[in-house]
Image (spheres, rainbow, N blue to C red):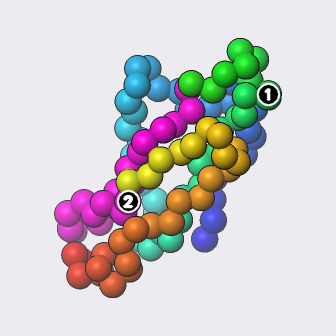
Amino acid sequence: MAFWFQPRIAPGDCWAFQGSRGHVVVRLPEQIWPTAFTIWHISEAVSPSGEVSSAPKEFAVSGVDEAAAETLLGTFTYDVHKEIAQTFHVQVPQDAREEGR
């Protein structure tokens, strides 16, 4: 299954957070086993200010099963000097996640 939260990538079309930290919870209608996450951010070339300091940097992704504890799926770093779309693969094998169920 693949889905996205915002189909457009354009200056100002973003999930802005006040300050340097943010937290997002996404509740899905059914249980999934994610394998990767892709984050997009505009490049300096299309940024109205010419900079991208608002791009995500270090972030963590966790999975939560309502019947079990939270499982850290990985910690990642978005690099503004690389491609605007960066894919990060889950760092916890599925069998390890199933043990927590």
Measured from the top left, where is residue 54 in percent x and y?
55, 26
Q: Does 80 sit above or below residue 63? A: above
Q: Does 15 sit above or below residue 79? A: above
Residue designated by label 1: 46
**Left-right relation of 86 to 90:** right
- 75 in magenta: no
Residue designated by label 2: 74
Question: Which amino acid, mark 1?
Answer: Val
Nearest the camera: 94 or 47?
Answer: 47
Q: Is residue 6 visible?
A: no
Nearest the camera: 3 or 94?
Answer: 94
Q: Which residues are magenta?
A: 54-74
Q: Residue furthest top?
A: 49
User: In the picture, residue 50 is in which quadrant?
Assistant: top right
User: In the picture, residue 48 is in which quadrant?
Assistant: top right
Residue at the (40%, 68%) spot, across then down: 91
**Left-right relation of 59 to 8:** left
Q: Is residue 13 visible?
A: yes
The first of marks 2 and 1 along the sequence is 1
Q: Classify mark 1: helix, strand or loop.
A: loop
Residue at the (38%, 38%) spot, across then down: 23
Measured from the top left, where is residue 77 in percent x and y?
47, 47
- 69 in magenta: yes
Residue at the (22%, 68%) spot, across then down: 67
Q: Does 21 sit above or below residue 57? A: above
